[in-house]
Amino acid sequence: MVFWKRLFSNSSDSVTSALNSNFKGEFLDIEGETNSQRRIFLSTERDINLYELEELCDAVGWARRPLRKVKQALNHSFLVVSMWEVEKNQRRLVGFARATSDHAFNATVWDVVVHPSCQNKGLGKALIKYMIHQLRNKDISNITLFADPQVIDFYRRLGFVLDPEGIKGMFWYPN
Ligand SMILES: CC(C)(COP(=O)(O)OP(=O)(O)OC[C@H]1O[C@@H](n2cnc3c(N)ncnc32)[C@H](O)[C@@H]1OP(=O)(O)O)[C@@H](O)C(=O)NCCC(=O)NCCS
């Protein structure tokens, strides 16, 4: 089985040209990965092409949202995490998640996605662990999210608790 092993900082010429030198983040070392040319990179940079993000969301069948509003949502997010596949001097967005926050106690994670071609390799787990790590570094202690029914166990494995002390999520929608 392929799974993530460790995070480390690194750079090489081809990677630098694929990501550009301002793009900061960390590489993910994938155990069992045979293609040494292919690297996975995690970043909190917000410089994300909205069309590329839309393509990623299309790939998992999510309903399209107006890009103007997606841009606004990204701009107003507390944390944006992107995951890139870097090969030779090309990069491809393969994962994404963002969090909103009160900047003091609470953060809520939204829009968690890994491209189908990269699923079941431990990348989703690495993405969420990275998100938690970044939020903990910002002294956020309460991290919540809304899980689709089919991914509850994915989040459970990462330490998320369903309905702690019977607390229920409640929603209000316009009629
Ligand atoms: C949910 C998603 C992010 C998981 O990403 P992934 O890269 O395939 O997940 P991983 O390979 O890191 O899996 C980590 C663990 O969770 C398990 N897992 C993955 N998807 C799961 C699912 N849908 N249900 C239950 N367990 C799941 C894996 O078996 C693995 O278990 P292990 O640690 O015991 O080996 C990805 O499937 C996805 O993008 N789905 C479509 C979008 C979506 O549903 N997003 C969530 C909205 S709330």
Image (spheres, grey):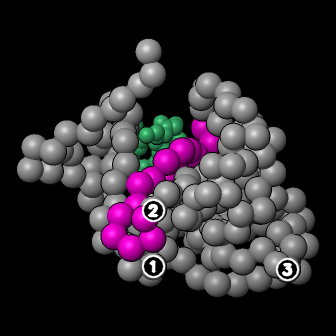
**Lower sequence index among marks 3 and 2:** 3
Indicate left or right for 24 with 174 as reference: right
Circle 2 or circle 1, nearest the eye: 2
Quadrant where the C terminus is found in the figure: top left
Q: In the image shown, does 94 or 96 lie closer to the viewer?
A: 96
Q: Is residue 63 above or below residue 40?
A: above
Q: In the image shown, does 17 or 44 lie closer to the viewer?
A: 44
Quarter of the image where ligand 1 sits: top left
Q: Does 130 lie within the magenta span?
A: no
**Labels 2 and 1 touching (C-beta < 8 A):** yes
- Residue 122 position, x and y percent, is 48, 55
Residue farthest to the left, as pictured: 165
- Residue 70 position, x and y percent, is 68, 43
Instruction: Name the amino acid type tagged 1.
Output: Lys
Which residue is identified by label 2? 101
Give the magenta range: 102-124
